[in-house]
Image (spheres, rainbow, N blue to C red):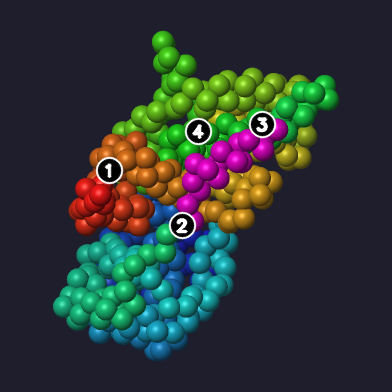
Amino acid sequence: MTTKLPAIGAPDRHSALVTEQEMPPEIVARAQEYLADFKSARAAKTIRAFENGVRLFRAWCESGGHGWFPASPATVAAFVASIAKQPFRRIVTKRGKPTAITTGPIAAATMKQYLWAIGLLHRSADLPDPTKTGKVGFAVDAFERDVGVWQRQAPALTREASDRMVAEIERRLGDAREDGKPASLYDLRDRALLLVWRDTLARVGEVVRLRWDDFERHPVKASGSVRIRRSKTDQKGQGHARHLTAEAVAALDVWRDAHAAAIDQALAAIPEPSAGNVEAARRRTRWAALAAARDFVFVGVHRAGITPLSDTAAVRVLNDRAADAGVLQRFSGHSVRVGTTQDLLADGHEVAAIAQAGGWKDIKMVLRYGDRLLTERSAVAQAEASRSRKEP
């Protein structure tokens, strides 16, 4: 008898979390209930990480003839040792579709994410967690000694680079004014995006999900604030306020007017839907999508309509604007966060204050991002500077 666990992803043989061994129905029922609750309570990225980890482990086990669910500690330990040393072909979910990729020797953090997925799968069925055993613990220690625990840092988008990018956008807007042409929607949006992103130290997923209701203008000063509704470390949505400079607020004001006008124009271009036909249903769908996009601050304007900006599109904006400004660097969704942190450290701001500005619960990530810069403020560096000042 083949027993199936719930397929959280796409329903094909790669995504279905299926066991080839006979399992008691009560164990399967527990796993089904647990994983259904897990899906409803966790973010989409967390669910994808779980799916990808289980698929990789299953594929590795099946290629070597190992039982994957339930798995023995010896099997999990062998898996950890193997992925540290050799490339492995695996299936991951990209844009909702199973995609084959080849994984080379991986980082320690990625390995631990795989172990988390294996452990969660077993705990979902109230089975012993093979990852919490001494044998697997020794395998993890050996992995970390062999591979190391250092993580590659995202390239930093510093203030100097972002100032150049904003200045290039300002130049384009100025040229349009001089020529009597309307300002480009993309220029207005991207200027606001860069400034808000830099001020808030937001993750890419946080900045693209901002809504107009999240902003508040300070009653006296020209500056303002924004509330990050939900983040990687705040899955329950307690929220965290971030400061916005007067420059960012001014850019948002201009973009907001252009944003509203673009939505109104797109709505006016859709004929009034008549009842009872397929075309009417399509028009109502387009109306609903535009109405939803009105709430989001950063949107994409394209042939298909106006939709909230995606993570991928936001990173593309960074790299396109960098190329326009002659910044010869490729950036990722974490680059603004890293670069602004380093700028603040270089300016001498306290680590705790930077952690608060970026929404970190502790200072570990600030210290990691600023590792090189903080060496210049170490006791040895300060002592050397002091001696230099005393020398005649």
Q: Earlier in the sequence, mark 3 or mark 2?
A: 2
Residues at marks 3 and 2 touching, judged by CB atoms closer than 8 Å: no
Tell me the CA gap for discs 1 and 2: 19 Å
Q: Earlier in the sequence, mark 1 or mark 4?
A: 4
Q: How many marks?
A: 4
The residue indicated by pointer 1 is 351
**Residue depicted at x 41% and y 74%:** 106
Tell me the CA gap for discs 1 and 3: 32 Å
The residue indicated by pointer 3 is 170
Q: Earlier in the sequence, mark 1 or mark 3?
A: 3
Residue 196: assigned label: 4
Residues at marks 4 and 3 touching, judged by CB atoms closer than 8 Å: no
**Residue depicted at x 16% and y 78%:** 134
Q: Position of residue 37 (x, y in %)?
A: 33, 50
Q: Amino acid at mark 2?
A: Ala
Classed neighbour count for the residue bearing mark 2: other residues with Cα under 10 Å, few (<14), some (14–19), many (≥20):
some
**Residue depicted at x 31% and y 53%:** 376
Residues at marks 1 and 2 touching, judged by CB atoms closer than 8 Å: no
Q: Amino acid at mark 3?
A: Glu
The quadrant of the rendering that contains the N terminus is: bottom left
In the image, which is nearer the foreground, mark 3 or mark 2? 3
- What kind of element bears circle 3? helix
Q: Answer whether residue 130 is magenta in the image.
A: no
Q: Residue furthest front?
A: 392
- What kind of element bears circle 1? helix
Residue 154: assigned label: 2
